[in-house]
């Protein structure tokens, strides 16, 4: 039996190259080795975007198509919509009894995100999203969760909940499998502005849905070594965004380009042109797939609905087992 992985994205806008480098690329490989479940997390999206339900709704198709366009095979994976899976809602309630508010408050990712969103008084839903995420992972008995390191505290929380559940209600049996993180080892992609993270909300991203012209213009705007004013100045690739992108997207020429930059043998314009070409080359096949799915939205809908149906069957069984273990039933 193949091991199962579960991962996915909040539906709060299109995915960008940071997502590609950090997770999508890996997903495409993993789908051949694992039974792959991809969650379109529209409920979790509400924790921060509850005032923008239309954006969340539109993003369901955008995020689904982003995933399909990079090569996730709909015949091979189970892509489903979080809000359609009743087991996730039910498990979230049961698990909420097993988590202390303080442990959620001390979760480093919750803290960082709360600061980022400017929350001082956290909503119950936001504070508790690691609990709901535990339901996302365990409703289908996932063995592994491929995520970036920012999600590690959440996986740890999920493991604790599973352990606690099993100790309390398992009578020596494992009812809820303890999931394991599968950390992607690619370094995080920085933003076009040199910010340490490429992010939707930071306005410094190249989107998978960007056109050739978008990519060219964005790469042109990328921050380079600010001390390099003339083409004759020697550059410092260590503080240049474009060099970091060459490392990620043009690895074979990376060392060479750094050397040329350091010796003032290549100018920033030429260097950026090379990069834009590389990125456009990478995205070209994605654009083709995207165009197809944009034309065939009903197919995307069918993929999501079929995936959700399958996920619901798995989820119903899990809820039955959990309720039985917790004696939530009458004879
Ligand atoms: N929190 C994840 C993110 O922001 C998205 C997500 C929701 C997720 N549910 C999940 C990831 C379950 C892994 C497993 O990227």
Image (cartoon, rainbow, N blue to C red):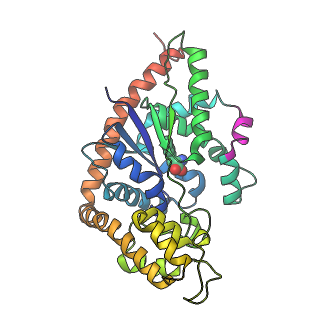
Q: Position of residue 126 (x, y in %)?
A: 63, 47
Query: Residue at point 54% right, 57% down?
Result: 188
Residue range of the region highlighted in magenta in the rendering = 100-108
Q: Position of residue 63 (x, y in %)?
A: 40, 57
Judging depth in this view, the residue of 130 and 212 nearest the camera is 212
Magenta part, dominant SS: helix
- Magenta stretch encompasses residue 152: no
Query: Residue at point 48% right, 66% down?
Result: 255
118 left or right of 182 in image: right
Residue 106, picture quadrant:
top right
Q: Position of residue 218 (x, y in %)?
A: 48, 78
Res 16 seen here:
no
Query: Residue at point 58% right, 77% down?
Result: 224
Q: Is residue 305 above or below residue 88?
A: below
Res 161 seen here:
yes
Residue 308, picture quadrant:
top left
């Amino acid at each position: 039996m193949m091991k199962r992985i579960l991962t996915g994205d909040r539906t709060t806008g299109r995915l960008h190259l940071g997502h590609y480098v950090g997770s999508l690329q890996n997903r495409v490989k993993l789908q051949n080795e694992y039974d792959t479940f991809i969650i379109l997390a529209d409920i979790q999206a509400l924790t921060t975007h509850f005032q923008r339900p239309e954006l969340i709704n539109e993003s369901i198709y955008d995020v689904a198509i982003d995933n399909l366009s990079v090569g996730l095979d709909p015949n091979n994976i189970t892509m489903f919509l979080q809000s359609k899976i009743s087991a996730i809602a039910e498990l979230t309630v049961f698990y909420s009894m097993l988590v202390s508010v303080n442990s959620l408050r001390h979760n480093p990712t919750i803290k960082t995100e709360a600061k980022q969103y400017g929350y001082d008084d956290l909503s119950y839903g936001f504070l508790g999203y690691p609990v709901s995420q535990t339901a996302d992972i365990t409703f289908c008995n996932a063995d592994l969760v491929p995520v970036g390191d920012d999600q590690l505290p959440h996986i740890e929380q999920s493991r604790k909940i599973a352990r606690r559940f099993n100790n309390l209600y398992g009578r020596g049996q494992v009812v809820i499998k303890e999931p394991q993180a599968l950390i992607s080892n690619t370094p995080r992609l920085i933003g076009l502005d040199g910010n340490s993270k490429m992010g939707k909300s930071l306005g410094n991203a190249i989107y998978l849905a960007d056109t050739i012209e978008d990519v060219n213009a964005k790469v042109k705007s990328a921050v380079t070594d600010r001390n390099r004013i003339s083409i004759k100045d020697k550059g410092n690739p260590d503080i240049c965004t474009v060099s970091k992108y060459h490392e990620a997207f043009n690895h074979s020429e990376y060392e060479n380009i750094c050397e040329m930059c350091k010796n003032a043998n290549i100018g920033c314009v030429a260097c950026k042109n090379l990069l834009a070409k590389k990125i456009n080359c990478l995205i070209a096949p994605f654009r083709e797939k995207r165009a197809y799915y944009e034309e065939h939205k009903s197919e995307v809908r069918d993929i999501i609905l079929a995936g959700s149906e399958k996920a619901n069957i798995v989820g119903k069984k899990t809820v039955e087992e959990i309720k039985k273990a917790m004696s939530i039933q009458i004879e």
